[in-house]
Image (cartoon, rainbow, N blue to C red):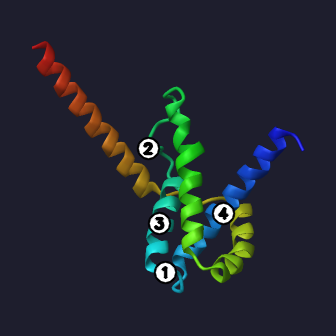
Amino acid sequence: MSTLNQLKNYAKKLKKDIFVLYLSYKDSRTPLLAKGVAICVVAYAFSPIDLIPDFIPILGYLDDLILVPLGISLALKLIPDYIIDENQTMAEHIQKNGKPKNWFVGILFIIIWILFAVWIGKLLLSLFS
């Protein structure tokens, strides 16, 4: 199997795991810590805005390549296996119908970037005035 095919299969598995987490954090049997981690990972993965925008060279893709898979892995380890197994079939159905958007997290990231830009602007004004 070629490296490209392996990467494609890995990406498909990660995408399916996001939907499993989405269903698992809604499950009342999921432990509280696992729910917290799963909520953060799902909210970030479904957010239309990245913490580090993709147009920033190299750094822009680090969150997609490193942070999201690490978060998925951690959350799945915290959730009991029987919950994950039950949610995998439902995850396939959701995946076929399209992923939900989390606009709250997207707006939160926009606000963070605006505040960061204002802070940098004030810093530059103070340096050059």
Which is nearer the eye, 101 or 113?
113
Q: Name the residue under label 1.
A: 31
CA–CA distance in space, label 4 to label 1: 18 Å
Q: Which of 120 and 102 is in front in this view?
A: 120
Quarter of the rendering containing residue 126: top left
The mark nearer the N terminus, 2 or 3, is 3
Residue 86 vertical position relative to residue 111 in the rendered view, above or below: below
Whether residue 100 is visible: no
Residue 36: percent from the left, percent from the top? 44, 70
Side (left or right) of 37 relative to 11: left
Residue that badge 4 annotates:
17
Which quadrant: the C terminus?
Answer: top left
Please name the residue that numbered disc 3 is placed on. Answer: 37
Mark seen at residue 51: 2
Disc 4 and disc 1 in contact, CB within 8 angstroms: no
The residue at the point 54 percent across, 72 percent down is: 78
Q: Which residue is drawn at 55% across and 52% down?
A: 68
Reading the chain from its start, which is encountered first: label 2 or label 4? 4
